[in-house]
Image (spheres, grey):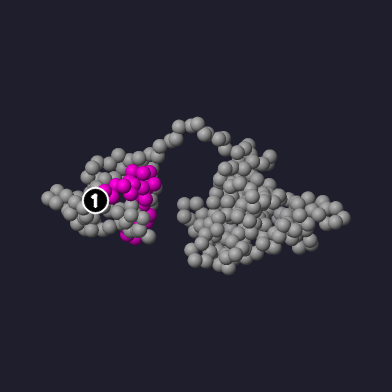
Amino acid sequence: MTAREAGPGPSDAGGRSDAGGRSDAEGRSSAGGRSDALGRRLPATHGSLARGAAAPLPGTVFALALTGGMTLGPGEGREVLFGRNRPEVHVCLGEDDPEVSRHQGTLTHRHGHWWVRNVGRLPIRCAGGRLLFRDEEPLPLDVGYTPLFAGGARGREHLLEIFVTGPEGARPVARHGDVTRPPRMWALTEQEKLALVALGRRYLRHEPRPQPLTWRQTCAELAEVQPGAGWTDKRVEHLVNGVRTRLSRDGVPWLTREELGEPVGNALNDHLIRALMASTTLVPMDLTLIAAA
C-alpha cells in the first residue's frame, strides 16, 4: 500500500489528521496540497536542504520547493508527488508556470531506495546534466543532497531539492575552520597550455553552446600569436592528444573513443576542455595568452 493510498491517519471528530492540516476523503489538506498521514509538511520558510537534514529513521526523504515541501520515511511503495497542481500533489513546483506539468514527477520507495520518475511533458534535469524524460526508467537517488530542475516557459527552471538521510540520519558535520582543499590541477607545458587555450577559447569566453576550434583554426590562431614558431595542424593535434591521454590515465572519464563510441566528432576535445576548466587548469584569464589573435 502506497503512502498516498494509506488514507488519513488517526483523526478527531473534526476531521483533523495527524499529518497536520484538515483533510477530506480525497486527501487534500488545508495547506493547499495533498495530505499524507505518513508524512510531514515542510513550510516555505524551511532552509535549503543543501545544508543537510536529519531524521530518526535512515532512508527518510525530504523534498522541498519554493512553496514548501514534505518529508516521508521509507516504506515499500511510498510516494511523494510533485508538480504544478497544488491540490493534487505533495510538493507544489512551478505553480505559476503552465509548461510545468500538473503532475511532473514522483519519488517512490522501492527495494530499500528512493527513485525519481518523470511523468510530465518536459524532461527533468538531474545531476551531471542528465535529462530524465517522461516514462523512462526511474533513476535512484543517492543518500545526501540531490537538486532536480523542471524546465518551464521562457527558459525558466524550477528547483526541487531532495535529501535522503543516511544510516545515522545525521546532518553533515560543519567544517568551518578546515583548510579549503584546492582542486586537482593538471601540469601543462607552455606550449600545451597555449594550444589548449586557443582550442577552447569559445568556452573561456563563455559563448553559448561552445564547440572546440578545428585543428586548422587553432593552428591559424597560434601562428598569429607566435609567427615563425612552426605551428602545424599535426603539432596541435599531438600536443592536445598527449594531454587528453594523461588525464584519461589519471581517471578523468569520457576522454577516449572507447568510452564515447562512434561517431566521436568534437566530443573528445569538448570533454577535455570542460575537464580542464572544471579543475581550474584553464581559466578565462588565460585568454591573455592569445590576446594578439
* Farthest residue, direction right: 13
Q: Is residue 108 visible?
A: no
Q: Amino acid at mark 1?
A: Ile
**Position of residue 132 measured from the top left corner of the image (x, y, whole percent):** 52, 59
Q: Quadrant of residue 59?
A: top right
Q: Is residue 283 left or right of residue 168?
A: left
Q: Nearer the viewer, residue 172 or 138?
A: 172
Residue at (69% x, 63% y) in the render = 87
Decide which of 118, 87 is in the foreground and name it: 87
Residue drawn at (43%, 35%), measured in percent from left and top? 181
**Which residue is tagged 1?**
290
The verdict on residue 282 being magenta is: yes
**Where does the magenta region start and end?**
260-288
Q: Secondary structure at mark 1?
A: helix
User: Percent from the top left, x then y, of residue 226?
Assistant: 16, 50
The residue that appears at 34% across and 60% down in the rendered structure is: 263
Residue for point 30% across, 54% down:
201
The reply to whether residue 152 is visible in this rendering is yes
Asked whether 2 falls inside the magenta stretch, the response is: no
**In the image: residue 13, left or right of residue 96:** right
For the C terminus, which image quadrant? Answer: bottom left
- Local crowd at mark 1 within 10 Å, few (<14), some, or many (≥20)? some
Position of 118 compared to 200: left or right? right
Depth check, front residue: 38 or 279: 279
Q: Quadrant of the N terminus?
A: bottom right
x and y percentages locating residue 40 in the rendered image: 71, 49
Q: Residue furthest left?
A: 228
Looking at the magenta stretch, what is its main secondary structure? Answer: helix
Q: Nearer the viewer, residue 249 or 37?
A: 37
Measuring from the top left, give residue 8's x and y in whole percent: 78, 55
